[in-house]
Image (spheres, helix red, strand yellow):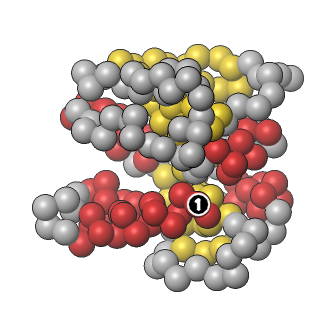
Amino acid sequence: MRKLKLQVQLSIDGYIAGPNGEMDWMIWNWDDELNQYVTQLTEPVDLILLGRKLAEGFIDAWASMASNPDTADAGAHKMNDTPKVVFSNTLKEVQWPHTRLAQEDLVTEITKLKSQEGKDIIAYGGATFVSSLIENDLIDEYHLLVNPSALGAGLPIFKDKSNFRLIQSTAFPCGIVALKYQRTPNS
């Protein structure tokens, strides 16, 4: 069975965005070590899952990076060339290359994707999409990139009590700490 990984940036107080979706607190100037960590995380991935809100900016931003000689790199091409599935209750179709719209409910669709032949799957998304993945216990590995910022209020992804087992932690010179967790059974 394929593994579903979540990669998300968090503030130290557990928010993935400010109260109005602000993301100005995130570190965007990653160091080489963090870039290498993310490259190793995404290398065995052959499918990307996205919520609609993030997809609208994410896909266009990566396409722009890949087409610009100054920003094109292996990561930009990986994000563009990897097939994507967008989960949305409002979209009727998607126009992005290598992208399809999820037609079934979240649990059914992801269970089907995880049971297919292939490499790992990675999910990126906003609070609503990621919270749904967590609530339905669909994530196999949590890769939380904790930024050295506290927001005081914002959009959380964890809505219920859950227990996790720390697999790995890595601090990077840019100030981000990567935490790799797995959910413990019966939590």
Residue occupying image coordinates x 75% and y 46%: 132
Residue 97: x %, y % from top left: 46, 79
The reply, left or right, for residue 75 in relation to residue 20 is left
**Between 10 and 22, the one nearer to me in the picture:** 22
Residue 55: x %, y % from top left: 53, 63
**Between 184 and 66, the one nearer to me in the picture:** 66
Q: Residues within 10 Å of mark 1 (few under 14, many from 20)?
A: some
In the displayed orientation, state which residue is furthest to the left. 70
**Between 6 and 3, the one nearer to me in the picture:** 6
Picture layout, residue 58 above or below residue 19: below
Image quarter where the C terminus lies is top right
The reply, left or right, for residue 11 in relation to residue 184 is left
Picture layout, residue 169 above or below residue 7: above
Picture layout, residue 106 above or below residue 157: below
Residue occupying image coordinates x 77% and y 23%: 162
Number of on-image labels: 1
Evaluate whether residue 159 shows in this view. yes
* Residue underneath mark 1: 53
Residue occupying image coordinates x 23% and y 33%: 31
**Between 176 and 183, the one nearer to me in the picture:** 176
Residue 14: x %, y % from top left: 58, 26
Say which element carries label 1. helix
* Rendered image quadrant of residue 177: top left
Evaluate whether residue 120 shows in this view. no
Name the amino acid, label 1: Lys
* Rendered image quadrant of residue 170: top left
* Rendered image quadrant of residue 155: top right
Residue 125: x %, y % from top left: 58, 51
In the displayed orientation, state which residue is furthest to the right. 186
